[in-house]
């Protein structure tokens, strides 16, 4: 039942296909508008410098990886990048096609917001975004913020998340001598992995730029794994874990005048995959016939304008549709299996305003409106519709030694169903207060702290899912306290950035599932209280050993003690919550030379508990990569070789869902 709930997600916008095709045609058209009166060529000048990492000195902790940092990791999807952030737990059900969700500081995946090019993504049915569907073909930067991020014009909906993952795609950088750029790449690897991708950037006129991204990914997913059966170690291959996905985007960037920017995005994603079941003793191929089809399409439009030298305004509009089909031929019912289909729609409007009041004081405000609708082919489905309104105001004070930020978020929600009784509406105020102190004038050392309160509404599955939904559920409330210190220093030969944050979180009215009549009929209840105490430590640095040898380091460690405080008489009281290790970390060491670049990545995790409080052993996965870029006949060629899980570690992140062992990937990219 829970696997079914996790696997059912959303979205289809059929009308967006036509618009996406038109946008793609425009982007590929030859530029006709740019005219050159004369061209002067000057001697090339090479400037070298030691790059400073993206370490944010914001009031609240913000971690950032740009595309140069990402290149040193062994990553294929966004979920692989997120594993390198401190304080993050990624639930991975195995393989390229397995479901991947992220939990920040023990808050749970439903408290994590995901923003793509400035507009929030979401799934009102499950409340969590599958990071496995987001590709890195054109990603310029990935950031993770606790508290609030540095965007002065961020939406009110973004403020409602306990933690915010921000993904920014690369904007075309073209000049009068380079009116078009194309990046073609191909990645192949173990278990039938094939991943071609193309990115085309075009200058349609002096004020209009475009980009088109398309990539296809497939794998048979038949990776070997071992299974402990008493004293015997049995060897199998994963079954029904094949996946085929297509992702396409068309973007337009229009700047009619300085300080005025229009951005349009058309997005398409479609996938078909098998859903490998849990590996069960004496039946490792159980439920091998479950299949999932997903289609997700959206369009979004942004307008940003500088109304004056002290005032900025941004507004965004998004329409998002999807459909999901889930088939389980082994489900025991009168019709001989399940063939459930869900259709989800979302309309979203946000508008934000920033005002600089003085040299030290500024303020911002935002209003958001969100409408969600879910239908299904299921009998007696309630067909819920939810309207959510957000509004927030923020004030900031900044001096040479002190930064103070205070924010208040108001949320209102109403719900309607076509059958049955709708859940109650809610109105809530959520504050944020953060302070940072710079004791020295050089800004190298910063002390900071914040308090933030957020809440997440029950999802449609929590409220209305067949046999287990509870329309009387209350929202979960998360209260976060954080205190930290950061230090950074740059010299002609290198840089060093250090960060330490301690935190304490409380999640009230935790929504949990408990057995009702028997183990086949469950109920959703507000019984939970989760307390998390933890610390995030990170160190990033680089050093120029010589003109031709540069070393990089990125090390992070997380201590997270997330315990269940729901019921004093429960056997789980005071125990770690499921799938939250106390100790975890990531280390990346890189060597950059003119001949070849190399890196070693190690991800480790301590023991965890599963839902039945059984211990899951910890693991350490080590991967290596070698890559090089060179110019051949005016073409820039990138070659990369990766060996993943070098030691062939056999481990699971989710119980009975084995992860792949040793594998390899080879990537070839050409830019022209």
Image (cartoon, rainbow, N blue to C red):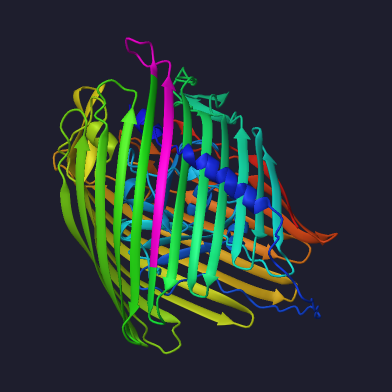
Residue bounds of the magenta highlight: 314-338
Q: Main secondary structure of the magenta part?
A: strand
Q: Quadrant of residue 398?
A: bottom left
The quadrant of the picture occupied by the C terminus is: bottom right
Could you say which is closer to the camera, residue 562 or residue 529? 529
421 vs 172: above or below: above
361 vs 249: above or below: below
- Residue 309 sits inside the magenta stretch: no
Q: Position of residue 21 (x, y in %)?
A: 59, 43
The quadrant of the picture occupied by the N terminus is: top left
Q: Position of residue 526 (x, y in %)?
A: 17, 41
- Is residue 73 rendered to the left or right of residue 564? right
Q: Position of residue 140 (x, y in %)?
A: 56, 60
**Does residue 632 show up?**
yes
Q: Residue furthest right?
A: 633
Kindly identify the residue that appears in the image at 32 percent across and 13 percent down: 333
Label tally: 0
Kindly identify the residue that appears in the image at 62 percent across and 45 percent down: 214
- Residue 315 sits inside the magenta stretch: yes
196 vs 205: above or below: above
- Is residue 639 rendered to the left or right of residue 329? right
Could you say which is closer to the camera, residue 413 or residue 197? 413
Q: Position of residue 179 (x, y in %)?
A: 71, 63
- Is residue 307 rendered to the left or right of residue 263? left
Could you say which is closer to the camera, residue 572 or residue 4? 4
Q: Quadrant of residue 499?
A: bottom left
**Does residue 623 show up?**
no
């Amino acid at each position: 039942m829970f696997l079914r709930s996790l696997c059912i997600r959303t979205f289809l916008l059929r009308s967006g296909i036509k618009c996406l095709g038109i946008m793609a045609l425009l982007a590929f058209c030859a530029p006709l508008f740019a005219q050159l009166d004369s061209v002067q060529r000057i001697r090339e000048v090479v400037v070298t410098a030691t790059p400073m990492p993206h370490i944010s000195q914001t009031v609240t902790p913000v971690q950032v990886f740009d595309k140069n940092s990402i290149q040193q990791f062994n990553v294929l999807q966004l979920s692989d990048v997120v594993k390198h952030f401190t304080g993050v737990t990624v639930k991975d059900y195995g393989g390229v096609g397995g479901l991947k969700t992220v939990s920040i500081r023990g808050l749970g995946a439903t408290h994590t917001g995901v923003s793509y090019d400035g507009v929030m993504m979401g799934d009102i049915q499950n409340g969590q975004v599958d990071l496995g569907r987001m590709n890195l073909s054109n990603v310029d930067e990935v950031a993770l913020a606790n508290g609030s991020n540095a965007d002065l014009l961020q939406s009110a909906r973004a403020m409602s998340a306990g933690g915010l993952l921000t993904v920014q795609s690369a904007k075309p950088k073209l000049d009068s001598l380079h009116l078009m750029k194309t990046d073609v790449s191909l990645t192949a690897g173990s278990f039938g992995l094939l991943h071609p991708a193309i990115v085309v950037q075009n200058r349609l006129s002096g004020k209009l730029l475009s980009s088109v991204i398309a990539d296809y990914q497939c794998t048979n997913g038949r990776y070997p794994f071992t299974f402990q059966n008493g004293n015997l170690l049995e060897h199998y291959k994963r079954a029904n874990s094949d996946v085929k996905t297509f992702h396409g985007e068309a973007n337009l960037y229009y700047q009619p005048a300085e300080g005025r920017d229009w951005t349009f995005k058309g997005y398409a994603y479609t996938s078909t995959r098998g859903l490998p079941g849990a590996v069960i003793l004496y039946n490792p191929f159980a439920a091998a016939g479950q299949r999932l089809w997903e289609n997700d399409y959206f369009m979004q439009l942004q307008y940003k304008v500088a109304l004056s030298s002290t005032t900025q305004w941004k507004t965004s509009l998004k329409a998002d549709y999807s459909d999901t089909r889930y088939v389980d031929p082994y489900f025991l019912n009168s019709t001989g299996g399940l063939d459930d289909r869900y259709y989800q729609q979302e309309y979203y409007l946000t508008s934000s305003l920033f005002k600089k009041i003085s040299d030290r004081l500024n303020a911002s405000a935002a209003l958001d409106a969100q409408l969600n609708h879910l239908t299904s082919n299921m009998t007696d489905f309630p067909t819920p519709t939810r309207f959510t309104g957000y509004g927030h105001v923020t004030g900031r004070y900044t001096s040479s030694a002190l930064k103070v930020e205070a924010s208040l978020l108001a949320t209102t929600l109403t719900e309607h169903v076509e059958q049955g009784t709708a859940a109650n509406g809610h109105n809530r105020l959520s504050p944020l207060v953060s302070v940072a102190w710079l004791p020295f004038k050089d800004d190298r050392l910063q002390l900071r702290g914040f308090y933030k309160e957020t809440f997440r509404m029950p999802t449609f599955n929590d409220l209305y899912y067949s046999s287990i939904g509870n329309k009387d559920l209350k929202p979960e409330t998360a209260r976060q306290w954080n205190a930290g210190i950061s230090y950074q220093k740059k010299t002609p030969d290198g840089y060093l950035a250090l960060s330490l944050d301690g935190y304490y979180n409380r999640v009230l009215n935790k929504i949990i599932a408990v057995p009702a009549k028997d183990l086949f009929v469950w109920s959703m209840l507000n019984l939970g209280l989760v307390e998390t105490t933890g610390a995030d430590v990170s160190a990033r640095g680089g050093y120029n050993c010589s003109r031709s040898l540069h070393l990089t380091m990125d090390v992070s460690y997380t201590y997270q003690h997330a315990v269940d405080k729901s019921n004093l008489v429960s056997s789980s009281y005071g125990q770690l919550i499921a799938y939250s290790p106390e100790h975890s970390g990531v280390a990346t060491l890189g060597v950059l030379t003119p001949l070849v670049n190399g890196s070693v990545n190690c991800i480790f995790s301590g023991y965890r508990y599963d839902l039945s409080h059984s211990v899951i052993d910890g693991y350490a996965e080590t991967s290596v990569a070698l890559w090089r870029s060179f110019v051949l006949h005016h073409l820039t060629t990138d070659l990369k070789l990766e060996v993943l899980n070098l030691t062939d570690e056999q481990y699971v992140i989710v119980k009975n869902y084995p992860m792949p062992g040793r594998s390899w990937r080879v990537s070839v990219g050409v830019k022209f």
